[in-house]
Amino acid sequence: MPAEFRPKRGQAWLLGRIFRSLVGRSCRFALIFGRRGSAALPTNWRRYSPRYEICGLGLLLALATVLAYQPAWHARFIWDDDVYVTNNTLLTAPDGLRRIWFSLDSPSQYFPLVYSALRMERGFWGLAPAGYHWVNLLLHACNALLLWRLLRRLGLPGAWLAAALFALHPVQVESVAWVTELKNVLSLFFCLLAARSWLEFVEEGPRRWWWYGAALCCQGLALAAKTTACTLPAALLLMLWLKRRPIRLARLLQLAPFLVMGLAMGLVSMWWERYHQFTTASTFSIGWTARLLIASRAVWFYAGKLAWPASLSFSYSRWHTSVGNPLDWIWLAGGIAAGGAILALRKRAGRGPETAALYYVATLSPLLGFIMEYTFRYSFVADHYQYAASIGPLALAAAGLERLFTRMGAAGRAARPLACAALLSLLGVLTWKQCGNYADSQTLWQATLRNSPDSFIARNNLSHALLEKGQVDEAIRLSRESLAIEPDDPVGEINLGCALLQKGRLDESIEHSRRAVALQPNVPDAYYDIGQAYLKKGDMPAAITNFQLALQWRPDFAAAWCNLGFALLQAGQMREAQAHYEKALALDPDYALAHNDLGNILLRQGETSQALAQFQRAAQLNPEFAEAHFNIGGILLGLGRLDEALSEYEEVARLRPQLAEAHFMLGRLAAAYAGAGRHAQAAAVAQRALQLAQAAHETDLATRLAADAQSYQQASQTRKTP
């Protein structure tokens, strides 16, 4: 387990229970099957061997999954993980849970169960990414186990192999190694539970209506995790059809609540996407015929990645479809031909191929382009879109292999374990390799550019990752390349504006940020960057206006509240500034800059003890925050706590050795030591300040400090003379 993953008490209990269960079952399995000869086995071993065999196979499946995803154990947050986790105030605000479920404050789609789970995780392990990755991974392993049991219940041959293919296929890496896709693994988890409960219900055994209620509850939870669970009724219907169960009016009425729930959540998501997200009119302007062509091509694309998982990418290039281009109709024609072939082979192959194909298309349908989403601005396809849908083709492939080995007789029985082991090992290695691309944002986007050289979103996000590391020139180059590919991309303009802002090219930064606003008015980051540029130019009214616009589009933007407070403070509106800083801290209690600035306001108001508490909190949150240490030192010096003040100023000198104010304050501290009669300490501190001033070429200050140091030294020697 990664070193940075330090389980807390509740989490340790959960992981410990899982570990003990797995180890205990594996030991018992080894006891039964690991000894040679039937004489060494318990007399009743035949009665219990199927149970232990199932436990052993389950353990093998879980361990193989965990090991295949080993690089994800140490991965960091990527792309919009900041929106979901690191910068999501809903996870830390006192009223966050209420707002998650009953407000429009969610930073993306309406995924209340996902944000509730992330809020719980935030409480367990803070911002240590390993904990979040382990949750995704364990849920994926659970999904594989649930899928195995479900396919066994349906009577499909090769159920374990199908579950293993699902668990180890590299196309699933995006859903597991990306923290944000907790919504994918969590939604499928409840979908599988709903499907199992539905089967129990239709078997008409005891407590059948209890199982029906459980299925409905599980679908509700699945929809609260991701709206694509609205396709679950189609899967439940296909299970009945596959098992040749009669589908009468009563059964359809029983499915009606599932359908209504899915439709309702789908309508909520469509409204949210259109009016609460950034999906632009140009995206919606694609005609329905073109959407049909996009969907048919997407189905073939996904099937191709399942059959041959090469050149997998976090983001694929967005293709352009034209109704007038005959080549764009090939995918639709191929789909019709494939459907005809499946129907023609029905007598020989049974209902399996039809069921798999219908399930695949039905489960993919919300993400094929018929309903436009914000992400379709970048690409019409993504690996994580087929996380649940892939079950159909993979189960069909496993059943086909199982039947092939059966028909081969003794040779097939001998070849089956070796062939399956080779196939799963290959997939496991590919998954392990693909996980390496998710180590951090820079690695991810560099890998994306290798596979999709014309991807403008990869350039945008690599630019952002490099900007965070201070590589401003490279970030500017990538942003310009991105805009050359997609000139009307507001994100590219925002990134370029932000990079130019850091470079100090304020007018150019304002120009590009304004262009982003012209392309898409509801982008708070662009207004925020314009506000920062005007703040640096000293134009407080313009800065205030733009920070207010940023907050109009994003009321929980803590950084905008903080900078608006600073602008108001510079404009002389201290009381209003204090209120804005307090609002920023209410949204983000761990915002070090806001604590420091609020401390400055409190210090001006004479509330020294409260100001000191704010400065100390800022330094605690960010130990490298030199200004916070400087402010603490000033208060401690005023309180006569000289040794503590010296410690703070030494920290400032370490962090900012060229800071003239720190050298001056060390000189004042030396004088305070002298005033207290501690001349030896005064001389030492003055000498330290002198060294720093000389290194910073502060001639006048160095001259004064040299004289002071000599005076303190003489006073110290005089005191020692009897």
Image: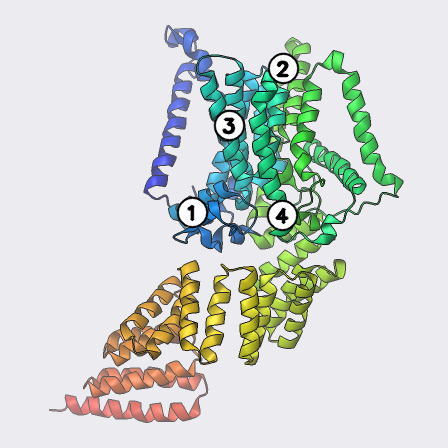
Relative to residue 707, is residue 222 drawn left or right?
A: right
Secondary structure of residue under mark 3: helix
Q: Is residue 704 visible?
A: yes
Q: How many angstroms separate mark 1 from mark 3 (CA)?
A: 23 Å
- Check disc 1: other Cα within 10 Å, few if <14, some if 14-19, many if 20+: some
- Residue at mark 1: 97
Disc nearer the start of the sequence (1/3): 1
529 and 524: which is toward the camera: 524
Q: Position of residue 107 (x, y in %)?
A: 54, 52
Q: Amino acid at mark 1?
A: Leu
Q: Which residue is at a point 75% across and 58% down the rendered structure image? A: 485
- Check disc 2: other Cα within 10 Å, few if <14, some if 14-19, many if 20+: few
Q: How many angstroms separate mark 1 from mark 2 (CA)?
A: 42 Å
Q: Amino acid at mark 3?
A: Leu
- Return the mark for residue 273: 4
- In this rendering, the answer to whether 673 lies above or below 1 is below
From the viewer's perspective, is the residue at label 1 or at label 2 nearer? 2
- Return the mark for residue 216: 3
Relative to residue 467, is residue 698 drawn left or right?
A: left
Which quadrant holds residue 569? Answer: bottom left
From the viewer's perspective, is the residue at label 4 or at label 2 nearer? 2
Q: Amino acid at mark 2?
A: Arg
- Return the mark for residue 248: 2
Disc nearer the start of the sequence (3/2): 3
Q: Position of residue 629 (x, y in %)?
A: 36, 72
Q: How many angstroms separate mark 1 from mark 4 (CA)?
A: 22 Å
631 and 577: which is toward the camera: 577
Q: Position of residue 248 (x, y in %)?
A: 63, 15
Number of disc labels: 4
Q: Amino acid at mark 4?
A: Glu
Secondary structure of residue under mark 1: helix
